Image (cartoon, helix red, strand yellow):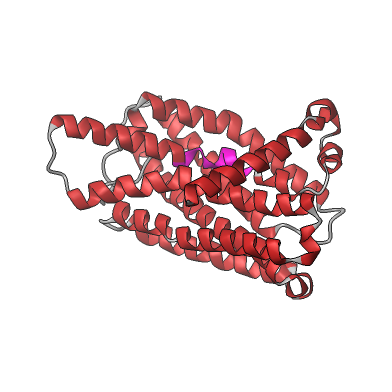
């Protein structure tokens, strides 16, 4: 994967520092070698368990699809590094690949917001959620999200202010994610039905905590860094250029590692660890230990998010 192109030209400008930096190279291999099987396994488990469940986690499935786009397109950058950077076919391939990277990142942010909204409605409006929230409605909303993401990605490809615009877009989910987390937390404390269902309460907050925590850690540094340098301009000394390149590599690496974390949302959607064991019967022994991990991760994510909000 590679970062956002800094200017628009026939071949969408020069490759950013992430493409040639050792950190970027290692991260791309980690994304492909670890992220691809991880997301595929989570995807397979979700589809298999859908045979027993009436409600399909449409938004989570689409989030995993956006992750697959980001991971799959990494192959273009991995292979391209074995050739000269000016080799025209691969230079053009990298430009097109950046469009799909942007599509994956934008749609991923959108589905994170939709997942948080869905968790909130499940707690605050349970009657509406179980009667009006159909798979058809969720699918239509998902299609609209994909259409908006694709339209933006195409426009962004020809934009001369790609970095600035995308950094602003990355900050748009922040108020929604914080609002949904806070509102859901309050609704859970007020709900009589949820007051004694500790496991379900943990599972709902676990999803929201993971989504919000992942957004704050992975996307916010990327946005603030890019906004800072976009507004500052290009007048910088050599020392500042090295800091700029390194900060760009590190924040881009965090964003591109998000598919590795998204698969964890699957854990909090299951009512029992036995559901996961049924999906992966060959991994029964290690998966039985996942129950303890699930509870600890939920507690730690809730604590971490509360500290970040305070």
User: Is residue 9 among what the camera can see?
Assistant: no
Q: Is residue 260 magenta?
A: yes
Report the quarter where the N terminus lies: top left
Magenta region: 255-263
Quarter residue 292 falls in: top right
Q: In the rendering, at what x and y percent does residue 169 appear?
A: 40, 59
Quarter residue 254 falls in: top left
- Which residue occupies 30% across, 37% down? 16
213 and 53: which is toward the camera: 213
Predominant secondary structure, magenta span: helix
Quarter residue 162 falls in: bottom left
268 relative to 86, above or below: below
308 and 86: which is toward the camera: 308
Q: In the picture provided, is 186 more to the left or to the right than 170?
A: right
Q: In the rendering, at what x and y percent does residue 61 appear?
A: 67, 53
Q: In the rendering, at what x and y percent does residue 111 appear?
A: 57, 58
Q: In the picture provided, is 239 more to the left or to the right than 190?
A: left
Q: In the picture provided, is 182 more to the left or to the right than 253?
A: right
Q: In the picture provided, is 200 more to the left or to the right than 114?
A: right
132 relative to 78, above or below: below
Q: In the rendering, at what x and y percent does residue 216 appear?
A: 47, 47
Q: Is residue 65 magenta?
A: no
């Amino acid at each position: 994967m590679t970062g956002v192109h800094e200017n628009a030209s026939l071949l969408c400008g020069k490759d950013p520092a992430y493409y040639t930096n050792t950190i970027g190279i290692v991260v791309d291999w980690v994304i492909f070698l670890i992220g691809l099987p991880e997301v595929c396994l989570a995807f397979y488990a979700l589809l298999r368990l859908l045979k027993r469940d009436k409600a399909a986690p449409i938004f989570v499935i689409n989030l995993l699809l956006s992750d697959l786009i980001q991971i799959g397109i990494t192959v273009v950058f991995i292979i391209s590094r074995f050739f000269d950077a000016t080799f025209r076919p691969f230079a053009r391939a990298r430009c097109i690949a950046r469009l799909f990277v942007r599509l994956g990142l934008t749609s991923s942010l959108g589905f994170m917001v939709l997942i948080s909204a869905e968790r909130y409605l499940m707690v605050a409006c349970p009657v509406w959620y179980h009667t009006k929230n159909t798979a058809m409605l969720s699918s239509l909303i998902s299609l609209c999200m994909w259409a908006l993401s694709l339209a933006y990605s195409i426009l962004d490809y020809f934009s001369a202010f790609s970095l600035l615009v995308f950094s602003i877009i990355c900050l748009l989910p922040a108020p929604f994610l914080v609002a949904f987390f806070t509102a859901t937390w309050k609704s859970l404390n007020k709900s009589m039905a949820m007051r004694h269902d500790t496991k379900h309460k943990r599972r709902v907050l676990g999803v929201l905590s993971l989504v919000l925590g992942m957004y704050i850690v992975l996307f916010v540094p990327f946005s603030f860094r890019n906004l800072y340098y976009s507004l500052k301009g290009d007048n910088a000394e050599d020392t500042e250029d090295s800091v700029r390149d390194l900060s760009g590599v590190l924040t881009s690496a965090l964003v591109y590692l998000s598919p590795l974390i998204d698969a964890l949302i699957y854990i909090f959607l299951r009512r029992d660890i036995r559901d996961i064991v049924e999906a992966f019967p060959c991994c029964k022994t290690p998966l039985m230990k996942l129950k303890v991990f699930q509870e600890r991760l939920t507690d730690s994510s809730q604590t971490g998010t509360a500290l970040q909000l305070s």
